[in-house]
Amino acid sequence: MTGHENYLVRKISTFVDLSVHELKYLSDLQSSPIRVKKGREIVHEGQAGQSAYIIHEGWACSFKLLPDGGRQIITFPIPGDCVGLRSILLRTSDHSFSALTDSLVSRIQAARMKDLFNELPRLGAAILWAASRDEAMVVEHLVSIGRRNAMERTAHFLLELNDRLQLVGLASNHSFACPLNQYVLADALGLSTIHVNRVLRLLRERGLVTLKNQMVVIQDMAGMKALAGYVNRDDDEQIEQ
Amino acid sequence: MTGHENYLVRKISTFVDLSVHELKYLSDLQSSPIRVKKGREIVHEGQAGQSAYIIHEGWACSFKLLPDGGRQIITFPIPGDCVGLRSILLRTSDHSFSALTDSLVSRIQAARMKDLFNELPRLGAAILWAASRDEAMVVEHLVSIGRRNAMERTAHFLLELNDRLQLVGLASNHSFACPLNQYVLADALGLSTIHVNRVLRLLRERGLVTLKNQMVVIQDMAGMKALAGYVNRDDDEQIEQ
DNA sequence: CGGGAGCTTGATGGACCTCAATCCCTGTGG
DNA sequence: CCACAGGGATTGAGGTCCATCAAGCTCCCG
Protein backbone atom coordinates (compact mmCIF):
# COMPACT_ATOMS: atom_id res chain seq x y z
CA MET A 1 0.00 0.00 0.00
CA THR A 2 1.43 3.29 -0.98
CA GLY A 3 0.33 6.83 -0.99
CA HIS A 4 -3.05 6.65 0.68
CA GLU A 5 -4.43 6.26 4.09
CA ASN A 6 -4.89 2.76 5.43
CA TYR A 7 -8.46 2.63 6.60
CA LEU A 8 -8.30 -0.89 7.97
CA VAL A 9 -5.43 0.01 10.26
CA ARG A 10 -7.27 3.09 11.34
CA LYS A 11 -10.37 1.12 12.18
CA ILE A 12 -8.55 -1.65 14.00
CA SER A 13 -6.56 0.87 16.00
CA THR A 14 -9.71 1.98 17.75
CA PHE A 15 -9.88 -1.54 19.13
CA VAL A 16 -6.29 -2.52 19.82
CA ASP A 17 -2.89 -0.89 19.46
CA LEU A 18 -0.96 -2.84 16.87
CA SER A 19 2.70 -3.65 17.23
CA VAL A 20 5.21 -2.77 14.54
CA HIS A 21 5.31 -6.40 13.54
CA GLU A 22 1.56 -6.62 13.24
CA LEU A 23 1.44 -3.42 11.21
CA LYS A 24 4.06 -4.83 8.89
CA TYR A 25 2.14 -8.06 8.45
CA LEU A 26 -1.05 -6.18 7.72
CA SER A 27 0.77 -3.98 5.28
CA ASP A 28 2.21 -6.98 3.42
CA LEU A 29 -1.23 -8.48 3.25
CA GLN A 30 -2.37 -5.43 1.32
CA SER A 31 0.68 -5.17 -0.87
CA SER A 32 -0.80 -5.86 -4.31
CA PRO A 33 -4.20 -4.24 -4.56
CA ILE A 34 -6.48 -4.75 -7.51
CA ARG A 35 -8.50 -2.09 -9.31
CA VAL A 36 -12.13 -3.00 -9.80
CA LYS A 37 -14.39 -1.06 -12.13
CA LYS A 38 -17.74 0.25 -11.04
CA GLY A 39 -20.48 -2.33 -11.42
CA ARG A 40 -18.11 -5.26 -11.66
CA GLU A 41 -18.99 -8.34 -9.61
CA ILE A 42 -16.17 -9.43 -7.34
CA VAL A 43 -17.58 -12.60 -5.82
CA HIS A 44 -20.57 -14.51 -7.13
CA GLU A 45 -22.94 -16.29 -4.78
CA GLY A 46 -22.03 -19.94 -4.52
CA GLN A 47 -18.57 -19.32 -5.86
CA ALA A 48 -16.03 -21.62 -4.29
CA GLY A 49 -12.90 -19.50 -4.47
CA GLN A 50 -11.96 -19.19 -0.86
CA SER A 51 -10.80 -15.63 -0.56
CA ALA A 52 -11.52 -12.60 1.52
CA TYR A 53 -11.08 -9.05 0.34
CA ILE A 54 -10.02 -5.85 2.01
CA ILE A 55 -11.47 -2.66 0.58
CA HIS A 56 -9.08 0.26 0.27
CA GLU A 57 -11.00 2.71 -1.87
CA GLY A 58 -14.54 2.87 -3.13
CA TRP A 59 -17.82 1.40 -2.03
CA ALA A 60 -19.01 -2.14 -2.62
CA CYS A 61 -22.30 -3.85 -2.00
CA SER A 62 -23.05 -7.38 -0.88
CA PHE A 63 -26.38 -8.82 -1.91
CA LYS A 64 -28.46 -11.80 -2.82
CA LEU A 65 -30.59 -12.19 -5.92
CA LEU A 66 -33.97 -13.86 -5.88
CA PRO A 67 -35.47 -16.11 -8.55
CA ASP A 68 -37.93 -13.36 -9.50
CA GLY A 69 -35.11 -10.96 -10.23
CA GLY A 70 -35.41 -9.05 -6.97
CA ARG A 71 -32.29 -8.06 -5.13
CA GLN A 72 -31.70 -7.58 -1.43
CA ILE A 73 -28.59 -5.69 -0.49
CA ILE A 74 -27.13 -6.90 2.80
CA THR A 75 -24.58 -4.23 3.46
CA PHE A 76 -22.33 -1.70 1.76
CA PRO A 77 -18.70 -2.47 2.51
CA ILE A 78 -16.64 0.71 2.65
CA PRO A 79 -12.90 1.38 2.87
CA GLY A 80 -11.37 -0.54 5.74
CA ASP A 81 -13.93 -3.31 5.60
CA CYS A 82 -13.17 -7.00 5.08
CA VAL A 83 -15.62 -8.98 3.04
CA GLY A 84 -15.96 -12.65 2.37
CA LEU A 85 -14.42 -13.83 5.63
CA ARG A 86 -17.26 -16.29 6.02
CA SER A 87 -16.54 -17.95 2.71
CA ILE A 88 -13.20 -19.05 4.08
CA LEU A 89 -14.91 -21.33 6.54
CA LEU A 90 -18.00 -22.19 4.54
CA ARG A 91 -16.22 -23.23 1.37
CA THR A 92 -18.65 -21.28 -0.78
CA SER A 93 -19.81 -17.72 -0.58
CA ASP A 94 -23.33 -17.28 0.73
CA HIS A 95 -23.86 -14.10 -1.25
CA SER A 96 -22.43 -12.03 -4.06
CA PHE A 97 -20.71 -8.76 -3.90
CA SER A 98 -19.80 -6.18 -6.43
CA ALA A 99 -18.19 -2.77 -6.71
CA LEU A 100 -20.56 0.18 -6.53
CA THR A 101 -17.87 2.63 -7.54
CA ASP A 102 -14.43 2.20 -9.01
CA SER A 103 -12.59 0.50 -6.20
CA LEU A 104 -9.27 -0.71 -4.98
CA VAL A 105 -9.21 -4.00 -3.10
CA SER A 106 -6.75 -6.61 -1.86
CA ARG A 107 -7.46 -10.28 -2.20
CA ILE A 108 -6.49 -12.52 0.69
CA GLN A 109 -6.29 -16.23 0.01
CA ALA A 110 -7.90 -18.46 2.59
CA ALA A 111 -4.61 -20.12 3.49
CA ARG A 112 -2.96 -16.78 4.04
CA MET A 113 -5.75 -15.74 6.36
CA LYS A 114 -5.48 -18.95 8.32
CA ASP A 115 -1.77 -18.37 8.74
CA LEU A 116 -2.52 -14.97 10.11
CA PHE A 117 -4.72 -16.43 12.81
CA ASN A 118 -2.04 -18.92 13.76
CA GLU A 119 0.88 -16.56 13.75
CA LEU A 120 -0.65 -13.35 15.02
CA PRO A 121 -3.70 -14.30 17.03
CA ARG A 122 -4.02 -10.82 18.45
CA LEU A 123 -4.27 -9.35 14.98
CA GLY A 124 -6.63 -12.15 14.05
CA ALA A 125 -8.83 -11.24 16.99
CA ALA A 126 -8.83 -7.63 15.87
CA ILE A 127 -10.03 -8.64 12.42
CA LEU A 128 -12.71 -10.80 13.97
CA TRP A 129 -13.70 -7.86 16.12
CA ALA A 130 -14.25 -5.76 13.02
CA ALA A 131 -16.17 -8.58 11.40
CA SER A 132 -18.33 -8.97 14.50
CA ARG A 133 -19.14 -5.32 14.37
CA ASP A 134 -20.35 -5.77 10.83
CA GLU A 135 -22.41 -8.76 11.81
CA ALA A 136 -24.05 -6.70 14.49
CA MET A 137 -24.98 -4.20 11.84
CA VAL A 138 -26.55 -6.86 9.68
CA VAL A 139 -28.67 -7.77 12.68
CA GLU A 140 -29.67 -4.15 13.16
CA HIS A 141 -30.55 -4.01 9.48
CA LEU A 142 -32.74 -7.06 9.94
CA VAL A 143 -34.54 -5.35 12.79
CA SER A 144 -35.03 -2.26 10.67
CA ILE A 145 -36.59 -4.10 7.80
CA GLY A 146 -38.72 -6.28 10.04
CA ARG A 147 -40.08 -3.75 12.44
CA ARG A 148 -39.43 -0.17 11.36
CA ASN A 149 -41.48 1.71 8.80
CA ALA A 150 -39.93 3.21 5.70
CA MET A 151 -39.00 6.53 7.24
CA GLU A 152 -37.54 5.17 10.45
CA ARG A 153 -35.69 2.59 8.44
CA THR A 154 -34.17 5.10 6.07
CA ALA A 155 -33.15 7.40 8.89
CA HIS A 156 -31.61 4.53 10.78
CA PHE A 157 -29.68 3.41 7.75
CA LEU A 158 -28.18 6.84 7.16
CA LEU A 159 -27.19 7.22 10.80
CA GLU A 160 -25.47 3.87 10.75
CA LEU A 161 -23.61 4.75 7.59
CA ASN A 162 -22.51 7.99 9.19
CA ASP A 163 -21.10 6.14 12.19
CA ARG A 164 -19.30 3.58 10.07
CA LEU A 165 -17.74 6.22 7.88
CA GLN A 166 -16.66 8.26 10.88
CA LEU A 167 -14.80 5.26 12.22
CA VAL A 168 -12.49 5.42 9.21
CA GLY A 169 -12.49 9.20 8.94
CA LEU A 170 -14.69 9.40 5.86
CA ALA A 171 -17.45 11.40 7.49
CA SER A 172 -17.51 14.59 9.45
CA ASN A 173 -19.90 14.78 12.37
CA HIS A 174 -22.98 15.33 10.27
CA SER A 175 -22.22 14.69 6.63
CA PHE A 176 -20.52 12.36 4.23
CA ALA A 177 -20.05 11.64 0.55
CA CYS A 178 -22.42 8.90 -0.53
CA PRO A 179 -22.43 7.30 -3.99
CA LEU A 180 -25.73 5.48 -3.44
CA ASN A 181 -28.57 6.30 -5.79
CA GLN A 182 -32.22 5.75 -4.98
CA TYR A 183 -32.36 2.42 -6.81
CA VAL A 184 -29.59 1.02 -4.71
CA LEU A 185 -31.05 2.46 -1.53
CA ALA A 186 -34.35 0.82 -2.33
CA ASP A 187 -32.73 -2.60 -2.69
CA ALA A 188 -31.01 -2.15 0.62
CA LEU A 189 -34.03 -0.92 2.52
CA GLY A 190 -36.50 -3.41 1.11
CA LEU A 191 -38.55 -0.63 -0.48
CA SER A 192 -39.43 0.47 -3.99
CA THR A 193 -37.40 3.21 -5.60
CA ILE A 194 -40.43 5.42 -5.73
CA HIS A 195 -41.12 5.08 -2.07
CA VAL A 196 -37.51 5.81 -1.21
CA ASN A 197 -37.90 9.01 -3.17
CA ARG A 198 -40.97 10.03 -1.21
CA VAL A 199 -39.39 9.17 2.10
CA LEU A 200 -36.30 11.22 1.28
CA ARG A 201 -38.54 14.12 0.42
CA LEU A 202 -40.34 13.84 3.74
CA LEU A 203 -37.08 13.67 5.63
CA ARG A 204 -35.88 16.73 3.77
CA GLU A 205 -39.12 18.64 4.35
CA ARG A 206 -38.92 17.92 8.05
CA GLY A 207 -35.42 19.36 8.16
CA LEU A 208 -33.88 16.06 9.25
CA VAL A 209 -31.51 15.10 6.48
CA THR A 210 -30.75 15.85 2.85
CA LEU A 211 -29.24 13.64 0.16
CA LYS A 212 -28.19 15.65 -2.84
CA ASN A 213 -25.28 15.52 -5.25
CA GLN A 214 -23.87 12.36 -3.72
CA MET A 215 -23.75 14.06 -0.35
CA VAL A 216 -25.66 13.22 2.81
CA VAL A 217 -26.09 16.02 5.32
CA ILE A 218 -27.72 15.21 8.61
CA GLN A 219 -29.27 18.48 9.63
CA ASP A 220 -31.01 17.44 12.81
CA MET A 221 -29.02 14.69 14.46
CA ALA A 222 -31.19 14.55 17.57
CA GLY A 223 -34.34 14.44 15.50
CA MET A 224 -32.94 11.67 13.35
CA LYS A 225 -31.93 9.55 16.31
CA ALA A 226 -35.29 10.04 17.94
CA LEU A 227 -37.11 9.08 14.76
CA ALA A 228 -35.00 6.02 14.07
CA GLY A 229 -34.65 4.83 17.64
CA TYR A 230 -30.93 4.89 17.04
CA VAL A 231 -28.41 4.02 19.71
CA ASN A 232 -24.67 4.21 19.29
CA ARG A 233 -22.44 1.30 20.00
CA ASP A 234 -19.65 2.31 22.32
CA ASP A 235 -16.98 -0.30 22.19
CA ASP A 236 -14.07 2.06 22.08
CA GLU A 237 -12.56 0.16 24.94
CA GLN A 238 -9.18 -1.42 24.42
CA ILE A 239 -8.71 -5.15 24.24
CA GLU A 240 -7.42 -6.48 27.54
CA GLN A 241 -5.97 -9.82 26.59
CA MET B 1 -22.76 -33.73 30.40
CA THR B 2 -24.43 -36.94 31.27
CA GLY B 3 -27.12 -39.05 29.87
CA HIS B 4 -28.14 -37.18 26.78
CA GLU B 5 -26.92 -36.77 23.29
CA ASN B 6 -24.40 -34.08 22.60
CA TYR B 7 -25.84 -32.08 19.76
CA LEU B 8 -22.91 -29.71 19.41
CA VAL B 9 -20.53 -32.61 18.84
CA ARG B 10 -22.93 -34.08 16.39
CA LYS B 11 -23.15 -30.85 14.45
CA ILE B 12 -19.43 -30.18 14.42
CA SER B 13 -18.72 -33.74 13.32
CA THR B 14 -20.37 -33.04 10.01
CA PHE B 15 -17.64 -30.50 9.45
CA VAL B 16 -14.53 -32.03 10.97
CA ASP B 17 -13.65 -35.27 12.75
CA LEU B 18 -12.68 -34.40 16.28
CA SER B 19 -9.79 -36.06 18.08
CA VAL B 20 -10.24 -37.74 21.44
CA HIS B 21 -8.51 -34.80 23.03
CA GLU B 22 -10.78 -32.29 21.35
CA LEU B 23 -13.84 -34.28 22.33
CA LYS B 24 -12.66 -34.33 25.91
CA TYR B 25 -12.07 -30.58 25.90
CA LEU B 26 -15.50 -29.96 24.45
CA SER B 27 -17.03 -32.25 27.00
CA ASP B 28 -15.32 -30.44 29.87
CA LEU B 29 -16.56 -27.17 28.52
CA GLN B 30 -20.09 -28.45 28.92
CA SER B 31 -19.57 -30.03 32.30
CA SER B 32 -21.85 -27.93 34.48
CA PRO B 33 -24.99 -27.08 32.60
CA ILE B 34 -27.61 -24.71 33.95
CA ARG B 35 -31.38 -25.20 33.84
CA VAL B 36 -33.27 -22.20 32.51
CA LYS B 37 -37.01 -21.90 32.87
CA LYS B 38 -39.21 -21.09 29.91
CA GLY B 39 -39.50 -17.36 29.29
CA ARG B 40 -36.44 -16.48 31.32
CA GLU B 41 -34.06 -13.98 29.79
CA ILE B 42 -30.50 -15.30 29.61
CA VAL B 43 -28.64 -12.29 28.23
CA HIS B 44 -29.96 -8.77 28.13
CA GLU B 45 -29.07 -6.43 25.29
CA GLY B 46 -26.20 -4.20 26.27
CA GLN B 47 -25.19 -6.51 29.08
CA ALA B 48 -21.43 -6.56 29.58
CA GLY B 49 -20.95 -10.06 30.98
CA GLN B 50 -18.70 -11.59 28.41
CA SER B 51 -19.99 -15.10 28.06
CA ALA B 52 -21.15 -17.42 25.36
CA TYR B 53 -23.66 -20.20 25.87
CA ILE B 54 -24.08 -23.65 24.41
CA ILE B 55 -27.63 -24.94 24.21
CA HIS B 56 -28.11 -28.58 25.16
CA GLU B 57 -31.87 -28.88 25.42
CA GLY B 58 -34.75 -26.62 24.54
CA TRP B 59 -35.24 -23.72 22.20
CA ALA B 60 -34.13 -20.15 22.76
CA CYS B 61 -34.74 -16.97 20.85
CA SER B 62 -32.48 -14.01 20.23
CA PHE B 63 -34.15 -10.70 19.61
CA LYS B 64 -34.07 -6.95 19.85
CA LEU B 65 -36.74 -4.75 21.37
CA LEU B 66 -37.75 -1.42 19.90
CA PRO B 67 -38.71 1.74 21.75
CA ASP B 68 -42.34 1.29 20.69
CA GLY B 69 -42.49 -2.12 22.31
CA GLY B 70 -42.08 -4.05 19.09
CA ARG B 71 -39.83 -7.07 18.98
CA GLN B 72 -37.82 -8.52 16.15
CA ILE B 73 -36.60 -12.05 16.64
CA ILE B 74 -33.28 -12.66 14.94
CA THR B 75 -33.00 -16.40 15.23
CA PHE B 76 -34.07 -19.36 17.31
CA PRO B 77 -31.05 -21.12 18.75
CA ILE B 78 -31.66 -24.85 19.08
CA PRO B 79 -29.71 -27.65 20.75
CA GLY B 80 -26.12 -27.69 19.56
CA ASP B 81 -26.05 -23.96 18.89
CA CYS B 82 -23.66 -21.48 20.44
CA VAL B 83 -25.01 -18.06 21.24
CA GLY B 84 -23.35 -14.87 22.33
CA LEU B 85 -20.02 -15.55 20.66
CA ARG B 86 -20.03 -12.00 19.35
CA SER B 87 -20.34 -10.49 22.80
CA ILE B 88 -16.93 -11.93 23.61
CA LEU B 89 -15.29 -9.61 21.14
CA LEU B 90 -17.69 -6.70 21.33
CA ARG B 91 -17.66 -6.35 25.09
CA THR B 92 -21.41 -5.97 25.22
CA SER B 93 -24.14 -8.06 23.73
CA ASP B 94 -25.83 -6.53 20.72
CA HIS B 95 -29.11 -8.27 21.43
CA SER B 96 -30.97 -10.16 24.09
CA PHE B 97 -31.83 -13.77 24.22
CA SER B 98 -34.16 -15.80 26.30
CA ALA B 99 -35.40 -19.34 26.71
CA LEU B 100 -38.51 -20.21 24.72
CA THR B 101 -38.91 -23.53 26.48
CA ASP B 102 -37.36 -24.97 29.61
CA SER B 103 -33.75 -25.35 28.59
CA LEU B 104 -30.38 -26.67 29.58
CA VAL B 105 -27.38 -24.54 28.71
CA SER B 106 -23.68 -24.26 29.49
CA ARG B 107 -22.07 -20.93 30.12
CA ILE B 108 -18.62 -20.37 28.68
CA GLN B 109 -16.62 -17.48 30.07
CA ALA B 110 -14.89 -15.29 27.52
CA ALA B 111 -11.44 -16.16 28.85
CA ARG B 112 -12.18 -19.86 28.58
CA MET B 113 -13.26 -19.45 25.00
CA LYS B 114 -10.13 -17.51 24.16
CA ASP B 115 -8.04 -20.29 25.67
CA LEU B 116 -9.84 -22.74 23.46
CA PHE B 117 -8.85 -20.82 20.35
CA ASN B 118 -5.25 -20.70 21.46
CA GLU B 119 -4.93 -24.31 22.55
CA LEU B 120 -7.11 -26.11 20.03
CA PRO B 121 -7.33 -23.94 16.96
CA ARG B 122 -8.86 -26.72 14.92
CA LEU B 123 -11.73 -27.00 17.38
CA GLY B 124 -11.93 -23.23 17.45
CA ALA B 125 -12.26 -23.18 13.70
CA ALA B 126 -15.04 -25.74 13.90
CA ILE B 127 -16.94 -23.55 16.33
CA LEU B 128 -16.43 -20.57 14.07
CA TRP B 129 -17.67 -22.68 11.19
CA ALA B 130 -20.91 -23.35 13.05
CA ALA B 131 -21.19 -19.69 13.94
CA SER B 132 -20.63 -18.70 10.31
CA ARG B 133 -23.38 -21.00 9.27
CA ASP B 134 -25.70 -19.23 11.67
CA GLU B 135 -24.62 -15.86 10.34
CA ALA B 136 -25.42 -16.99 6.85
CA MET B 137 -28.88 -17.83 8.07
CA VAL B 138 -29.35 -14.40 9.55
CA VAL B 139 -28.49 -13.00 6.14
CA GLU B 140 -31.01 -15.30 4.50
CA HIS B 141 -33.55 -14.15 7.05
CA LEU B 142 -32.80 -10.55 6.12
CA VAL B 143 -33.42 -11.35 2.47
CA SER B 144 -36.68 -13.03 3.37
CA ILE B 145 -38.01 -10.09 5.29
CA GLY B 146 -36.80 -7.58 2.74
CA ARG B 147 -37.87 -9.21 -0.47
CA ARG B 148 -40.20 -12.15 0.03
CA ASN B 149 -43.89 -11.87 0.68
CA ALA B 150 -45.52 -13.32 3.76
CA MET B 151 -46.15 -16.75 2.35
CA GLU B 152 -42.76 -17.23 0.74
CA ARG B 153 -41.16 -15.94 3.89
CA THR B 154 -43.02 -18.33 6.15
CA ALA B 155 -42.30 -21.29 3.91
CA HIS B 156 -38.65 -20.38 3.73
CA PHE B 157 -38.42 -20.08 7.46
CA LEU B 158 -39.90 -23.50 8.08
CA LEU B 159 -37.62 -25.13 5.51
CA GLU B 160 -34.59 -23.56 7.11
CA LEU B 161 -35.68 -24.73 10.53
CA ASN B 162 -36.13 -28.22 9.16
CA ASP B 163 -32.58 -28.23 7.79
CA ARG B 164 -31.07 -26.92 10.99
CA LEU B 165 -32.89 -29.48 13.10
CA GLN B 166 -31.90 -32.30 10.79
CA LEU B 167 -28.28 -31.38 11.24
CA VAL B 168 -28.56 -32.32 14.91
CA GLY B 169 -30.99 -35.16 14.39
CA LEU B 170 -34.04 -33.36 15.75
CA ALA B 171 -36.05 -33.57 12.54
CA SER B 172 -36.98 -36.40 10.25
CA ASN B 173 -36.93 -35.70 6.55
CA HIS B 174 -40.04 -33.61 6.56
CA SER B 175 -41.32 -33.04 10.07
CA PHE B 176 -40.18 -31.79 13.44
CA ALA B 177 -41.41 -30.78 16.88
CA CYS B 178 -41.73 -27.03 17.05
CA PRO B 179 -42.58 -25.09 20.22
CA LEU B 180 -43.19 -21.81 18.39
CA ASN B 181 -46.62 -20.27 18.65
CA GLN B 182 -48.06 -17.79 16.20
CA TYR B 183 -47.09 -14.77 18.28
CA VAL B 184 -43.47 -15.79 18.29
CA LEU B 185 -43.53 -16.66 14.61
CA ALA B 186 -44.94 -13.22 13.85
CA ASP B 187 -42.11 -11.50 15.69
CA ALA B 188 -39.60 -13.54 13.76
CA LEU B 189 -41.17 -13.04 10.35
CA GLY B 190 -41.87 -9.35 10.75
CA LEU B 191 -45.61 -9.94 10.43
CA SER B 192 -48.66 -9.58 12.64
CA THR B 193 -49.96 -12.62 14.47
CA ILE B 194 -53.16 -12.46 12.55
CA HIS B 195 -51.44 -12.48 9.24
CA VAL B 196 -49.28 -15.41 10.28
CA ASN B 197 -52.45 -17.26 11.04
CA ARG B 198 -53.89 -16.56 7.61
CA VAL B 199 -50.67 -17.52 5.89
CA LEU B 200 -50.50 -20.80 7.78
CA ARG B 201 -54.05 -21.53 6.74
CA LEU B 202 -53.20 -20.89 3.10
CA LEU B 203 -50.14 -23.11 3.30
CA ARG B 204 -52.27 -25.83 4.86
CA GLU B 205 -55.05 -25.47 2.30
CA ARG B 206 -52.54 -25.77 -0.51
CA GLY B 207 -51.26 -29.00 0.95
CA LEU B 208 -47.79 -27.61 1.53
CA VAL B 209 -47.23 -27.73 5.27
CA THR B 210 -49.14 -28.05 8.53
CA LEU B 211 -48.33 -26.70 11.97
CA LYS B 212 -50.48 -28.28 14.61
CA ASN B 213 -49.92 -29.43 18.18
CA GLN B 214 -46.36 -28.17 18.25
CA MET B 215 -45.54 -30.24 15.21
CA VAL B 216 -44.52 -29.08 11.76
CA VAL B 217 -45.15 -31.49 8.90
CA ILE B 218 -43.92 -30.54 5.47
CA GLN B 219 -46.27 -32.35 3.16
CA ASP B 220 -45.01 -31.13 -0.17
CA MET B 221 -41.30 -30.53 0.05
CA ALA B 222 -40.86 -29.74 -3.64
CA GLY B 223 -43.78 -27.34 -3.57
CA MET B 224 -42.40 -25.61 -0.51
CA LYS B 225 -38.97 -25.18 -2.00
CA ALA B 226 -40.42 -23.86 -5.22
CA LEU B 227 -42.60 -21.40 -3.35
CA ALA B 228 -39.85 -20.16 -1.07
CA GLY B 229 -37.06 -20.17 -3.61
CA TYR B 230 -35.18 -22.32 -1.16
CA VAL B 231 -31.73 -23.70 -1.87
CA ASN B 232 -29.83 -26.03 0.43
CA ARG B 233 -26.37 -25.26 1.57
CA ASP B 234 -24.07 -28.16 0.89
CA ASP B 235 -20.98 -27.75 2.94
CA ASP B 236 -20.66 -31.34 4.03
CA GLU B 237 -17.09 -31.24 2.90
CA GLN B 238 -14.41 -31.98 5.45
CA ILE B 239 -12.00 -29.36 6.61
CA GLU B 240 -8.70 -29.74 4.83
CA GLN B 241 -6.34 -27.85 7.10
C1' DC C 1 -29.95 17.67 -30.48
C1' DG C 2 -30.93 13.18 -28.77
C1' DG C 3 -30.49 9.79 -25.34
C1' DG C 4 -29.84 7.90 -20.98
C1' DA C 5 -29.41 7.80 -16.00
C1' DG C 6 -31.47 9.36 -12.15
C1' DC C 7 -35.09 11.99 -9.78
C1' DT C 8 -39.95 13.43 -9.12
C1' DT C 9 -44.91 13.26 -8.94
C1' DG C 10 -49.76 11.35 -9.41
C1' DA C 11 -53.17 7.65 -9.38
C1' DT C 12 -54.60 3.11 -8.27
C1' DG C 13 -54.50 -1.20 -6.08
C1' DG C 14 -52.92 -4.82 -3.04
C1' DA C 15 -50.55 -6.78 0.88
C1' DC C 16 -50.58 -6.52 5.34
C1' DC C 17 -51.96 -4.18 9.88
C1' DT C 18 -55.23 -2.96 13.50
C1' DC C 19 -59.29 -3.45 16.01
C1' DA C 20 -62.75 -6.51 17.60
C1' DA C 21 -64.91 -10.71 18.53
C1' DT C 22 -65.39 -15.69 18.94
C1' DC C 23 -63.85 -20.30 19.78
C1' DC C 24 -61.07 -24.13 21.39
C1' DC C 25 -58.30 -26.40 24.64
C1' DT C 26 -56.11 -27.11 28.99
C1' DG C 27 -55.36 -26.41 33.57
C1' DT C 28 -57.09 -24.96 38.17
C1' DG C 29 -59.70 -24.37 42.08
C1' DG C 30 -64.14 -24.70 44.38
C1' DC D 1 -67.95 -32.31 38.38
C1' DC D 2 -68.40 -27.79 36.83
C1' DA D 3 -67.09 -22.90 36.50
C1' DC D 4 -63.75 -20.14 35.13
C1' DA D 5 -59.56 -18.19 33.45
C1' DG D 6 -56.05 -17.82 30.21
C1' DG D 7 -53.18 -18.95 26.33
C1' DG D 8 -53.60 -19.75 21.76
C1' DA D 9 -56.00 -20.09 17.24
C1' DT D 10 -59.37 -18.25 14.09
C1' DT D 11 -62.22 -15.13 11.43
C1' DG D 12 -64.21 -10.57 9.80
C1' DA D 13 -64.13 -5.57 8.63
C1' DG D 14 -61.85 -1.52 7.71
C1' DG D 15 -57.83 1.21 7.09
C1' DT D 16 -52.82 2.20 6.05
C1' DC D 17 -48.50 1.70 4.16
C1' DC D 18 -46.20 0.82 0.41
C1' DA D 19 -45.89 -1.34 -4.49
C1' DT D 20 -47.01 -0.86 -9.16
C1' DC D 21 -48.06 1.53 -13.31
C1' DA D 22 -47.52 5.63 -15.92
C1' DA D 23 -45.59 9.83 -17.06
C1' DG D 24 -42.69 13.83 -17.08
C1' DC D 25 -38.70 16.14 -15.33
C1' DT D 26 -33.62 17.50 -15.01
C1' DC D 27 -29.05 17.07 -15.87
C1' DC D 28 -25.14 15.40 -18.12
C1' DC D 29 -22.70 13.70 -22.01
C1' DG D 30 -21.87 12.22 -26.57
Image (spheres, coloured by chain):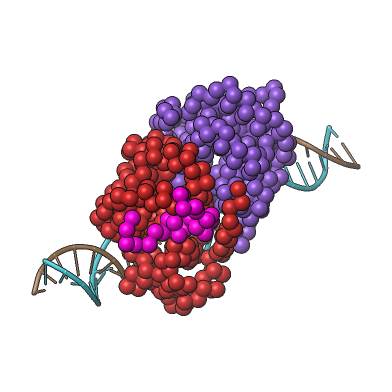
Chain colours: A red, B purple, C brown, D cyan
Farthest residue toward the front? A20
The boundaries of the magenta stretch are: A1-22
Above or below for B147 versus A14: above
Q: How many marks?
A: 0
- Residue B49 location, x and y as percent? 67, 49
Which quadrant does the N terminus of chain A fall into? bottom left
Residue pictured at 39% horizontal, 65% vertical? A196
Q: Is residue A177 left or right of residue B179?
A: left
Residue pictured at 49% horizontal, 43% vertical? A120
Q: Is residue A43 left or right of residue B9?
A: left
* Residue closer to the observer: A122 or B128: A122
Is residue A10 highlighted in magenta? Answer: yes
Residue B2 appearing in the image: yes
- Residue A207 location, x and y as percent? 46, 78
Where on the picture, by quarter, is residue B227?
top left
Above or below for C2 versus A44: below
- Residue B192 location, x and y as percent? 55, 52
Residue B210 appearing in the image: no
* Residue closer to the observer: A7 or A218: A7
Residue pictured at 59% horizontal, 41% vertical? B114
* Residue closer to the observer: D14 or B180: B180
Residue pictured at 43% horizontal, 68% vertical? A171
Is residue B202 highlighted in magenta? Answer: no
- Residue A183 location, x and y as percent? 33, 61
